[in-house]
Image (cartoon, rainbow, N blue to C red):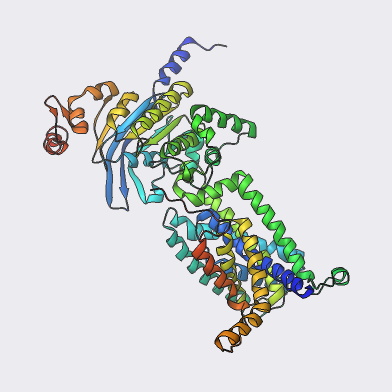
């Protein structure tokens, strides 16, 4: 009964604190290939954070380091730490991590091809000890976000379209009732319209279900339109970070990732080498 | 006509025995997408351990069974630890090669521990005709075969429900499709594999007991796995139901072919080509021919999952 007022202010203070914190991690594949050379980032509760960069910059590796899927690819986090809600999660196995609320949606969808869409979704609830009716209710919740999945729920996911597979993959992750989804390259191989649709749902989930997202994307402009904050990776390092709004209007980002500059459209190759070295790697 | 039915029923029941072995393959294939070359060796090991325990400690059937089952479960867990765990997310051919190695290991260890003698296994089931059927329908149906068919039927029903209706079964199928995605959604691969290899050990034990009781427990038991191959090709590698239907087709067709084909064929050959050859022993290769035809016409088998390719 003596709960003093300061406690409430303190908890209000932690609400904006980092949910996920990656501190200066280094990842080495096969004991020799250095992929991440000290990456640090933060995801605060209820936000959408974009992780941007070209092919091979280390976006996927960063996500897999967090979700601990690196081991099966002979990768290893050799330095740094990863914290979720203040506790270290670097050594947890993926299924324990899912239980704590962090799920990864892998690049390239990775649906279970021979399972129906509904069965795919149900596998997402594997780690939960929920009753049948709870699971059924969650299934309906997912169908509410992705009505198209409900129509096709009895078809084998291998026969569904790329967009439907991406929806299945996100829906499957939702079935675990996560607080954080690590979403890897959701736009890959999808028509621009479908990409918008998926991102709109991501924003919806973020707003209504308070799910935080760490989003790896090559499609910089789309990602920055939906994200709150962004990190730009290059060669395994964070070379730039900032609020999404700021990054979107940043002249350098525009030039490097879109080939747009004050002087109009430019060839990406011409700009790339010289400007990058000068500004970021000096 | 009576003789035809007798051959048919005999063949169907023999086919069920093939299905029993095929089931073990299907289990592993469904859960890891790999053809388990060691299944025959597991059948052999299970049967040998069973009779070995009986001999050594004078155990009754009901004593030796749980003990052997325990050994097979431990084996399943051990295989996951030693063989599979380091191979997560490796190409299927790597896993397949590992099972070949495992087959040699199991065959060797079984014989080192229990010796190489041929042993008799008595389950208390006689391979003799059932009298009521004999008097009423004038058909010879073996008691032993019928019991084996019953056991296989129960196993198939249980496994079919397990794979299609339960949470663990669904997870097993998910793992077979995509190891990494299964890990990503939180399915604990290690436990799942330990479970499935233990269940495969149990199926191997049942198959080993029935085959061992029929043919004696000896090294040749490892070759029953070869007879399961055409069954799998016909029925489909991923289908529990396919294993049973494939077994029935293989069993019935090879017996019927053995009985009727030589007469028909040699008559035909003699009449049109003036060739006279002895065609006995068709039973030995007929199943493989059938499998070959299936591979050409319907490579995924009757109930198998079609290979899905997106372009």
- Residue B117 horizontal side relative to residue A282, left or right: right
Compared across the picture, whether B114 is left or right of B308 comes to: right
Q: Position of residue B87 (x, y in %)?
A: 44, 57
Q: Is residue A260 visible?
A: yes
Direction from residue A49 to residue B165 in the image, left or right: right
Task: Give the image location of residue A104, x and y in percent.
Answer: 43, 38
User: Image quadrant of residue B141?
Assistant: bottom right
The answer to which quarter of the image holds residue A6 is top left
Give the camera-side residue of B220 and B156. Answer: B156
How many numbered marks appear? 0
Query: Above or below — where is B288 with respect to B246?
Result: below
Q: Is residue B1 above or below residue A47?
A: below
* Near-viewer residue (B60 or A244): A244
Q: Examine the image and state in which quarter residue A49 appears.
A: top left
- Taking depth in this image into account, of A109 and A132 the one nearest to the observer is A109
As drawn, the residue found furthest toward the front would be: B272
Q: Can I make out residue A20 in this image?
A: no
Name the spot of residue B38 as percent of width and height, x first.
Answer: 54, 67
State whether residue A191 is above or below residue B262. Answer: above
Q: Nearer the viewer, residue A37 or B27?
A: B27
Q: Is residue A262 left or right of residue B226?
A: left
Q: Residue at x 59, y 67 (%)?
A: B228
Quarter of the figure with the N terminus of chain B: bottom right
* Residue at x 57%, y 36% (from the top left corner): A128
Residue that appears at 42% across and 41% down:
A109
């Amino acid at each position: 009964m003596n709960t003093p007022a300061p406690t409430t202010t303190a908890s209000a203070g932690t609400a904006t604190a980092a949910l996920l914190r990656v501190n200066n991690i280094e990842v080495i594949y096969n004991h020799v290939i250095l992929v991440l050379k000290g990456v640090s980032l933060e995801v605060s509760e209820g936000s959408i954070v974009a992780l941007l960069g070209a092919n091979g910059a280390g976006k996927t590796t960063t996500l897999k380091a967090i979700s601990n899927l690196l081991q099966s690819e002979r990768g290893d986090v050799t330095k740094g730490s990863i914290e979720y809600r203040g506790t270290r999660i670097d050594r947890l196995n993926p299924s324990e991590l899912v239980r704590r609320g962090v799920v990864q949606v892998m690049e390239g969808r990775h649906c279970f091809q021979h399972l129906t869409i509904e069965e795919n979704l149900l596998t997402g609830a594997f780690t939960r000890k929920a009753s049948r009716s709870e699971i059924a209710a969650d299934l309906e919740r997912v169908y509410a976000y992705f009505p198209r999945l409900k129509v096709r729920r009895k078809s084998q996911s291998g026969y569904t379209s790329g967009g439907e597979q991406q929806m299945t993959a996100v829906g499957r992750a939702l079935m675990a009732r996560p607080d954080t989804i690590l979403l890897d390259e959701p736009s890959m191989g999808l028509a621009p319209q479908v990409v918008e649709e998926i991102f709109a749902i991501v924003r919806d989930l973020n707003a209504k279900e308070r799910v935080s997202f760490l989003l790896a994307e090559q499609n910089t402009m789309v990602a920055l339109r939906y994200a709150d904050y962004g990190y730009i990776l290059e060669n395994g390092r964070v070379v730039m970070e900032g609020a999404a709004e700021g990054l979107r209007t940043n002249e350098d980002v525009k030039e490097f990732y879109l080939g747009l500059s004050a002087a109009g459209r430019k060839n990406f190759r011409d700009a790339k080498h010289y400007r990058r070295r000068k500004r970021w790697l000096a | 006509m009576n003789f035809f039915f007798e051959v048919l029923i005999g063949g169907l029941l023999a086919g069920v025995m093939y299905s029993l072995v095929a089931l073990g393959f299907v289990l592993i294939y469904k859960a890891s997408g790999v053809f388990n070359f060691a299944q025959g060796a597991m059948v052999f090991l299970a049967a040998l351990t069973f009779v070995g325990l009986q001999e050594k400690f004078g155990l009754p059937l009901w004593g030796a069974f749980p003990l052997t089952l325990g050994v097979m479960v431990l084996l399943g867990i051990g295989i996951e630890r030693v063989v599979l765990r380091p191979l997560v997310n490796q190409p299927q051919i790597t896993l397949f090669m590992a099972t070949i190695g495992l087959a040699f290991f199991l065959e060797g260890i079984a014989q080192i521990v229990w010796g190489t003698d041929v042993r008799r296994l008595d389950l208390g089931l006689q391979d003799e005709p059932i009298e009521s059927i004999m008097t009423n329908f004038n058909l010879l149906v073996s008691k032993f075969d019928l019991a084996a068919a019953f056991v296989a039927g129960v196993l198939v029903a249980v496994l079919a429900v397990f794979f299609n209706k339960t949470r663990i079964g669904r997870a097993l199928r998910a793992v077979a499709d995509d190891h990494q995605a299964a890990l990503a959604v939180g399915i604990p691969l290690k436990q799942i594999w330990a479970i499935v290899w233990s269940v495969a050990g149990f199926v191997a034990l049942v198959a080993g007991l029935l085959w061992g009781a029929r043919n004696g427990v000896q090294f040749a038991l490892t070759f029953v796995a070869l007879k399961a191959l055409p069954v799998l090709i016909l029925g489909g590698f991923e289908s529990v139901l396919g294993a049973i239907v494939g077994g029935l087709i293989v069993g019935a067709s090879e017996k019927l072919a053995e009985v009727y084909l030589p007469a028909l064929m040699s008559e035909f050959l003699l009449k049109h080509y003036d060739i006279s050859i002895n065609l006995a022993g068709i039973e030995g290769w007929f199943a493989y021919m059938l499998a070959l035809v299936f591979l050409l016409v319907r490579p995924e088998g009757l109930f198998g999952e079609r290979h899905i390719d997106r372009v």
